[in-house]
Structure formats: structure tokens, C-alpha cells
Image: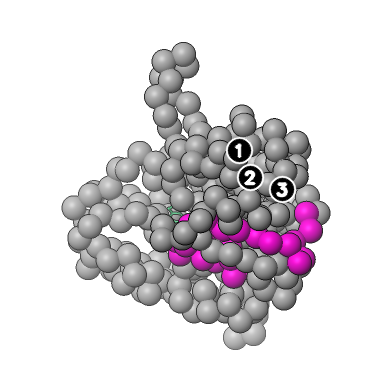
Amino acid sequence: MKLLDGKTLFANIKGEIKTEVSQIIDRNERPPHLAAVLVGDDPASLSYVASKEKACRQVGITSSLYHYPENFTENELLQVIDFLNHDQDIDGFIVQLPLPPQIDPNKIILSISPDKDVDGFHPYNLGRMMMGQPNFIPATPLGIMQMLERHQIETKGKHCVVLGRSMIVGTPVSILLSRKAKPGNATVTLCHSYTQNLKEICLTADILIIAIGKPRFITADMVKEGSVVIDVGIHRIPDNTKEKGYMIVGDVDFEEVSKKAEWITPVPGGVGNMTIAGLLMNTLNAWKQRNIRQNIN
Ligand code: GUN
């Protein structure tokens, strides 16, 4: 078993971005600026946003947080987005999901300017990705593709089984892996809650990507010997033996599955880090595209 070490890769990617941002600052240009919008105080969202802000600081990207109470209305949020769409000092922004029930996430995503949509969730950006002309690729799928590419894991002709069809992870990653590109050219099976014979399908996977949000769902009997296992899940489960009272696990039973897999992501220290890496990459790209547009005009 070899670890798909997201922590080291994240450090490498941060180093590359930091070098580029330092060059921007040395030229007396404004560094890239990422804004995050958070509505409410969901603990997981607070923790994600804090990690994103920390990573921005580490590489010299300016970050700002727009934090609003749980009862913020859809119209108020649309006004904030309109402001961010027009602010010349902001290259990209994200609206942290999930949103409270009074706010329709689809309406919010549609209102984000595609040029600033560093989450890559706007239909314009998802459409471009499907056409093989990506603008911004959603951060977690981008991070997973980076992980495969930088570990030189062959995807061409391989059978990739993706568990979970969310717009954030499962659906985009299945499109990216089946594209005529490198990494890509895989045969992809996308499984979901209505899939029959799930275990049999998983056993045929050369590359298994799990994003279903169920702690330790994938057990060793579901995994082919010598396969690549990428675990997108992250859960806190009670553990009295730990000082914090909990431990972090993924969608995969790491201890058992790691005995069969050739490559496997740890949790924590795997895909979670790569999501932030993907977001930083998109933010730097947003800055570059903005500069190109400004130099043309
Ligand atoms: N919630 C969980 N993952 C994400 C993500 O990648 N972006 C946003 N905006 N919200 C999320």
C-alpha cells in the first residue's frame, strides 16, 4: 500500500502558488483576492472557511470573509453577490454550502458571475468543463485530478467507479475521468443510492472514488486487490480514547481497505487538503484571466 498523501501535495502546490504570487507582488501588482460568503454558523462550514483563509494567508492571496446570520434572506444574499460580482478588487468568491433552507442554492449559484465562480458551480463553467474547455473546475474534482496526475497514476482505459452523484464531487469527477484528456480516458461507472449490486461493481474498479458521506461505508470485501481508493468523506465520530473526544474518519474503512489497495488516500490528510489546493489554483487563474481581460480592454 502506498499513501496518496494530500498533505505533501498540498504543501507542494502552495509552494508553487506562493512563488507566483510573490512575483506578482514584486511587480507592484495587486495580489489575487478570494472572498468567501458564509451564512449561519454550521461548524463544518466554519472550519472549511477557516482552512481556506489560512491557506490564502500562507501563499499571499488576500482573503476576506462575508459572514451573515442564519436568518439572512435570499434577497440580502443576492445583493451581497451583486456587490462581489462588481468589486474590481475581488478576483473570485465562493458561497459556502449548504445554505439555510430559506435560500435556494441554485438561484444563488446562477447569480454568481462565471468569471468569479472559483467553485466552478455555475452552469456556464460546468458546461465548459463538459465540452473539454474548462474555465474553473470544481475544487474537489480538480484536487483529485491533481492527485492522480502528480502521482502518475494511469487512468487511460481503466475502470473508474464513482460513488455519489453530487454536483460538487461525484458528477464532475465522473465527467473529468471520462474526458479525452490526461488524466482521463477512463471508463466510468457512476453509482448512487439506487444502484443495484454495488459491491460487485466496486469489485471491478481499478480506481474507486467514494463521496457518499457515510462513515467507513467501504469495507475490504468491496475493494479489488491492487486498486486505487480515493476517499472524499470526512466525519467526526465519538472516541473516548482521544483527548478531543472524537476521531476523524472517511467513507472508507482505512485500516482494512489499505491492506488491499495499491494506493489509498488517508483521512485526514488526503482529499480535504486537495480541495483547498484546487480552490487556490482557481483563484490564481481568476486573477490571471482578469489581467488578460484588463490588458485587452
Ligand atoms: N461545501 C462543501 N464543499 C464545498 C465546496 O467545495 N464549495 C462550497 N462553496 N461549499 C462547499
> Do the residues under discs 2 and 1 have CB atoms within 8 angstroms?
yes
The image position of residue 219, as x and y in percent, is: 56, 38
Residue at the spot 41% in from the left edge and 15% down from the top edge: 240
Residue at the spot 39% in from the left edge and 41% down from the top edge: 44
Look at the picture and state if 268 lies above or below 129. above
The image position of residue 160, as x and y in percent, is: 65, 60
Q: Of residues 247 and 159, which is closer to you in this image?
A: 159
Identify the image quadrant of the C terminus.
bottom right
Return the residue at label 1. 220
Q: Secondary structure at mark 3?
A: loop
Extent of the magenta region = 153-176
Return the residue at label 2. 223
> Do the residues under discs 2 and 3 have CB atoms within 8 angstroms?
yes
Return the residue at label 3. 227
Q: Amino acid at mark 1?
A: Ala
Q: Earlier in the sequence, mark 1 or mark 3?
A: 1
